[in-house]
């Protein structure tokens, strides 16, 4: 247990509670280490049948990584890096890999804000995951807003959403709700927030195997309360698939510019606030990730995040959003037309030889 992570075992269920409400449960390196330590212990413990991860706050499950820490640590050297920053991303991505391959049911209660690093600790891929959303869920991979890219495995799970939804969510960084999350395959079931106390009681009282199925049974009565078939993503799927299937960000923007529909115009307005460079890097990342397994996606992301701090786009994005709060980032390049293929390709040049990669042991 740390100041921000509470762990307990109740009737063979391991329960992790994120408890950093003032920071919307933004992940610190200490939190990442405690989550990793606990999950490694529970993975090897035959007495643990399932894991539940949740928040102590109704406002947020987890809003991402601690971006103020990113800024402070990134300012430490001219190259934009520090030992603690290197440790943060290496250990966070290793945690994402551990969760993705966790051999027991991994149940994430994604109530409130779920962004960036919060997605990384909820998107398990073991086949017995259970990702729960509520009407308070606000989900996004908004990293392009701060000069970063959708990491924590985003290069794996975004390209595997239906149609071109992954490109849309990654390049634009839009926030979606519960029905959209289920439509996109980024969540499994809906439970009203008013039922969370009853859900927690069910978890606490459950004995033996079958917690996942017990929660599914509990949630069955509520699935008609949201309309997945007519959510915003579903209504705009044709437009998303048409515009975001283009091979480059300039082509995507040109396609949107030729569409007078309100949805297309809303996206156009939003993209003007994003980093032109990181939109292009993100599209290339998602292309590459679509053919890779989780470990290789995380290794790819680890190299790209190193390049992001070297180039310092993220430091300018965090400055504008969090430090000075002027919401006027000076992106470099400032215009999409000035982002060259060579500059994008430089983000994918491996910073280390394969034998020295910090995530070389992921399998």
Image (spheres, rainbow, N blue to C red):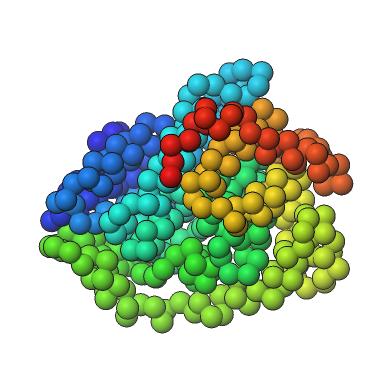
Residue lying at 30% horizontally and 72% vertically, measured from the top left: 216
Looking at the picture, how far across and down is residue 44, in whole percent?
22, 45
Q: Which residue does the image show at 30% across and 47% down from the upper left?
A: 17
Q: Position of residue 80 (x, y in %)?
A: 63, 24
Q: Is residue 57 above or below residue 332?
A: below
Q: Is residue 43 left or right of residue 234?
A: left
Question: Image point 48% across, 35% down: which residue?
Answer: 360
Dividing the picture into quadrants, the one containing residue 165 is bottom right
Q: Where does the image place residue 270, in percent across and percent down from the top left?
A: 72, 55
- Relative depth, front residue between 289 and 264: 289
Q: Is residue 239 visible?
A: yes
Which is more toward the observer, 158 or 221?
Answer: 158
**Which quarter of the figure is the N terminus placed in?**
top left
Q: In the rendered view, does 171 fall on the left or right side of 207?
A: right
Tell me if residue 196 comes above or below residue 353 in the rendering: below
In the figure, is residue 133 to the left or right of 170?
Answer: left
Residue 130 rendering spot, x and y as whole percentages: 35, 63
| Quadrant into which the C terminus falls | top left
In the image, is residue 353 above or below residue 119? Answer: above
């Amino acid at each position: 247990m740390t100041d921000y992570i509470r762990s307990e075992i109740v009737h063979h269920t391991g329960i992790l509670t994120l408890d950093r409400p003032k920071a919307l449960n933004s992940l610190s390196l200490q939190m990442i280490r405690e989550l990793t330590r606990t999950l490694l212990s529970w993975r090897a413990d035959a007495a643990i049948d399932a894991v539940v991860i949740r928040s102590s706050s109704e406002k947020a499950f987890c809003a991402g990584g601690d971006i103020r820490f990113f800024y402070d640590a990134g300012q430490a050297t001219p190259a934009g890096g520090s030992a603690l920053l290197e440790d943060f991303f290496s250990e966070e991505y290793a945690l994402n890999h551990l969760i993705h391959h966790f051999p027991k049911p991994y149940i994430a209660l994604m109530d409130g804000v779920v962004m960036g690093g919060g997605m990384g600790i909820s998107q398990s891929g073991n086949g017995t995951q259970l990702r729960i959303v509520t009407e308070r869920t606000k989900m996004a991979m908004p990293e392009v807003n701060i000069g970063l890219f959708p990491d924590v495995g985003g290069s794996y799970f975004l390209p595997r959403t239906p149609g071109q939804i992954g490109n849309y969510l990654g390049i634009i960084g839009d926030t979606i709700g519960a029905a959209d999350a289920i439509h996109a395959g980024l969540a499994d079931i809906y439970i009203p927030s008013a039922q969370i106390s009853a859900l927690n009681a069910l978890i606490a009282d459950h004995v033996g195997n079958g917690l996942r199925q017990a929660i599914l049974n509990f949630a069955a009565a509520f699935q008609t309360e949201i309309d997945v078939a007519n959510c915003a993503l579903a209504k705009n799927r044709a437009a998303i698939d048409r515009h975001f299937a283009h091979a480059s960000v300039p082509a995507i923007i040109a396609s949107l510019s030729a569409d007078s529909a309100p949805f297309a115009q809303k996206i156009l307005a939003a993209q003007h606030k994003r980093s032109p460079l990181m939109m292009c890097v993100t599209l290339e990342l998602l292309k590459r990730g679509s053919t890779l397994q989780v470990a290789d996606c995380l290794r790819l992301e680890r190299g790209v995040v190193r390049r992001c701090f070297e180039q310092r786009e993220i430091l300018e994005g965090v400055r504008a959003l969090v430090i000075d709060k002027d919401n006027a980032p000076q992106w470099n390049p400032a215009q999409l037309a000035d982002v060259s293929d060579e500059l994008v390709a430089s983000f994918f040049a491996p910073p280390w030889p394969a034998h020295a990669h910090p995530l070389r042991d992921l399998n």
